[in-house]
Image (cartoon, rainbow, N blue to C red):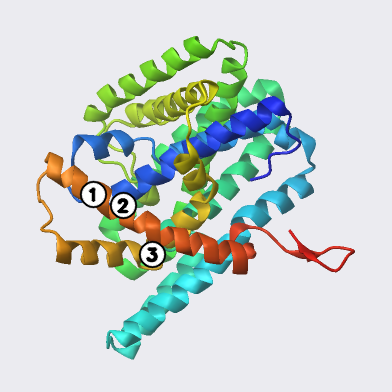
Amino acid sequence: MATGDTSQVSMERKQYLDAAKGVGINMIIFGHITTVGNPVDNWIGIFKISIFFIISGYLMAMNHTAEKYTAAEFLKRHGRSLMLPYIGYSIISIAYVFLRNLFLNRTLYSAWRKLLDMGYASLTLRGYSTLWFLPCLFLGQLLFLLWLKTPKVCRIVLFFLPIVITQVLEKVILSWKASLSSTTFKLISYPTLTISRSILALWFILAGYLCFMILEKWQVPLGRFLVGLAATFLTMFLSRYKGNTDINNLYVGKHPEIFYLCGILGAIGVILILEYLEHCRVPMNFLIWCGVHSLTIMATHVPLGFKALVIRGFSHVYALEKAATAKYYLEVIGIQAHLLMLECGVVQIVHQCFPFLEGKIRRKNTAGNTGK
């Protein structure tokens, strides 16, 4: 993500925002590992995706990103950082799944059918597995840029419009799923999901942008920390009533108002708490590392089979619990730790050998050395 020119304050804030992204990616991994509907998963599930959208809007407000660049520059910078990795990881994932199906002795017909399905999902930007997040964030940012270009009077109305559109599209998609064949449903739902999720991302980006503008006026570290704690506890309390949510398939639960409210409160709570911890000089190296490399972790831990590999390997060594006990949570944390250790190697390989998968392009400088 482009951050623009950074001052001393901006650099400090970027560290805790990276840590907040680290919290987000760890919550996502936890949710992908756990198979039990437990209180922890219910709590983090309500804002583990929205926190990335909130941070995006928060950063663009902090660094005046959208105002600094023309539409073409904005498109180029954000397209390179999000869509270049999306294209690269989509090609790698499609090739991996196709070869895996052949090695598993699946029929050539089923392998090609899966290949066509993944190809169509990628071309429509619906995305395969967790890769859906990258074009969703990119399109949400573009819609945000259009929102900034509208007259101020219209912005208030347009702030609430995404919620209305998203709710309508959710019902439309559910009706299609109930009445159409599987093939027809995929053909029309994939592009519709791309549009609807991007509109949902827009709303949370707007929320992050406005939250920064409001909080910027009150620079009292302890007071901001207490607000963060209050937002976190309120999110924990309300999450008990949200029901199941699945942004990937555009299902926000039986109580959409709780989903939208807690999506903001949970994210802002994490941001303000981590901001205060950084103010107190509490080390957050692990979370910062996870946040900096969250794109790579997001794009590989499920699409390339690392999550399934670690879970199956872990289950051969330990007898996994089936209920949400203390032992179950320790097992999930253990699986997550092993998965992140595997991701350390993946991140290093991508960083050293395939920088385009991080949205970076190496260029030769005038001295003939390679630079980024």
Q: Earlier in the sequence, mark 3 or mark 2?
A: 3
Q: Nearer the viewer, residue 58 or 275?
A: 275
Query: Relative to 200, does residue 186 appear above or below in the rendering?
Result: below
Could you tell me which secondary element the residue under label 3 belongs to?
A: helix
Q: Quadrant of the C terminus?
A: bottom right
Q: Earlier in the sequence, mark 3 or mark 1?
A: 3
Query: Relative to 133, does residue 85 appear above or below in the rendering?
Result: below
Relative to residue 274, is residue 236 drawn left or right?
Answer: left
Could you tell me which secondary element the residue under label 2 belongs to?
A: helix
Q: Which mark is residue 336?
A: 2
Q: Which mark is residue 213?
A: none
The residue shown at (46%, 63%) is: 345
> Distance of mark 3 from mark 1, alpha carbons?
33 Å
Which quadrant of the structure image shows residue 229?
top left
Q: Position of residue 361 (x, y in %)?
A: 71, 62
The residue shown at (42%, 24%) is: 269
Q: Position of residue 145 (x, y in %)?
A: 68, 38
Tell me, yes or no, if residue 165 can be seen here.
no
Q: Position of residue 234 (x, y in %)?
A: 32, 19
Q: Nearer the viewer, residue 152 or 275?
A: 275
Q: Look at mark 1 in the image and give the residue it sits on.
A: 332
Q: Look at mark 3 in the image and give the residue it sits on.
A: 186
- Tell me whether the residue at label 2 lies in contact with that at label 1, contact meaning CB atoms closer than 8 angstroms: yes
Which quadrant of the structure image shows residue 87?
bottom right
